[in-house]
Image (cartoon, grey):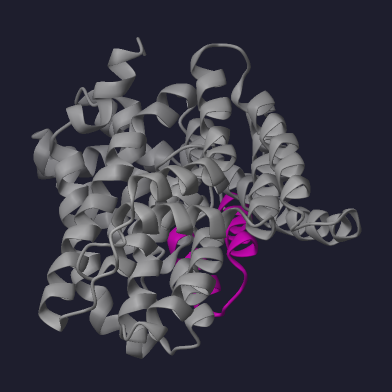
Amino acid sequence: MEIYILIISFVVFLMLRVPIAYSIGLSALITLCFSIPSLATFTVVAQRMATGLDSFSLIAIPFFIFAGELMNKGGIAKRLIDFAKSLVGSFPGGLAYVNIVACMLFGAVSGSAVAAASAIGGVMGKRMKKEGYDEAYSAAVNITSSTTGLLIPPSNVLIVYSLASGGTSIAALFIAGYVPGFLIGFLLMLVAGIYAYKKKYPIGLKAKWYEIFKYFLRALPSLFLLVVVVGGIVAGIFTATEASAIAVLYALILSLIYKEITINELPEIILKSAGTTAIVMLLVAASMSMSWTMSYENLPQAVTELLMNVSDNKFVVLLVINLILLGVGIFMDITPAVLIFTPIFLPIVTALGIDPVHFGIIMILNLSIGLCTPPVGSVLFVGCSVANLSISKVVKPLMPLFLVMIFGLLLITYIPDITMLLPKWFGF
């Protein structure tokens, strides 16, 4: 009965438009009231929320958020766009390729899909409109390609998954995200190429090798952040948490050198980063209380038994889990979804012999697709807002890109080497 109370109360709070963090915490509180005395319930929920935040690895999240804000304001996006244009701008419909590559690069250095959609979309939308591209199509390309930054490290969501999974190596997750992230970008570029051929979009001038080199040198300081952060973690020079602090210092120095940010603007950037951090941390705290409630009520065991009754074939089980997560992603943001569903599904897949790193990438990609769908897709809303378009206009050109992302999800799900090749190569 308690499991039904948990699910029904959570859904009711969401339907009443109660903020997601409060919905999670209140549903956990109400459910426990039916199992243990009310005073003990309030004590347990408060303790679980506090201990859920008592993790050294979580310190990386506010630092990476701050670094992302600095990069968003610091002129890094324009340099990455110029470099991407020199590489792929000469292909048919080349500006769509530029958008995808720039979103991949910016998402990688900022670790934020929303930041990539805002920064790259704000610049590329105007350029693509000027060149005769359909505005809705341009927004759709920007929205879907922005999610690749959640797979390509450094990524805050991968850190959250590490916490929810009980300590999966952040370094292994970071390395594992590269190939899947680039694969999704490549698949999006295939769709963009077909679309450009049908619509006969213009072909840009082919950049000379010295122009490519010039734009590469301009973008190199920004790209070097990836080498510093991920390289330092893999080499064992510093932890992911220490790397996040280094990322902030590096991004700050770079932004000041570019003269895109002044010292007077820092308080506003810090305040915005603090606000975003507060939202994320409240979600983490509330989700940890719900995770404990689900464990206390034996929900993971019940779901495991149910799925095993459906099939003990790991391919079938993974398909069912993917379908569930795709449904979850439509109605729930990625951070609470990772925190709530990782403890439920991870024991099932590990029992079937699936590596937690592999499942983490599957889960993050799956829920990233949900960021592109209404009614709560944050990247969808940001992309439409930047393009000044309604969601209804973007849905049609979004569908082919959405479907190819699902195809990529299936490839990554059923071909483990796509994810695990690099971690194995580095000895994880």
Residue depicted at 45% across the width and 63% down the height: 332
| Magenta-span inclusion, residue 22 | yes
Q: Nearer the viewer, residue 412 or 387?
A: 387
**Residue 1 in view here:** no
The mark total stands at 0
Q: Nearer the viewer, residue 292 or 3?
A: 292
The quarter of the image holding the C terminus is top left
82 relative to 32, above or below: below
Q: Image check: 340 left or right of 33? A: left
Q: Nearer the viewer, residue 318 or 237?
A: 237
Q: Quadrant of residue 31?
A: bottom right
| Magenta-span inclusion, residue 410 | no
The quarter of the image holding the N terminus is bottom left
- List x then y, in percent, for residue 204: 29, 69
Residue depicted at 49% across the width and 17% down the height: 234
- List x then y, in percent, for residue 381: 49, 76
Q: Nearer the viewer, residue 170 or 28?
A: 170
Q: Quadrant of residue 233?
A: top right
Residue depicted at 58% across the width and 35% down the height: 225
Q: Would you say the magenta stretch is mainly helix, strand or loop?
A: helix
Residue depicted at 41% across the width and 68% down the height: 331
389 relative to 306, above or below: below
Give the magenta part as a residue range: 6-33
- List x then y, in percent, for residue 249: 75, 35
- List x then y, in percent, for residue 353: 21, 22
393 relative to 194, above or below: below
Q: Image check: 285 left or right of 118? A: right
**Residue 157 in view here:** yes
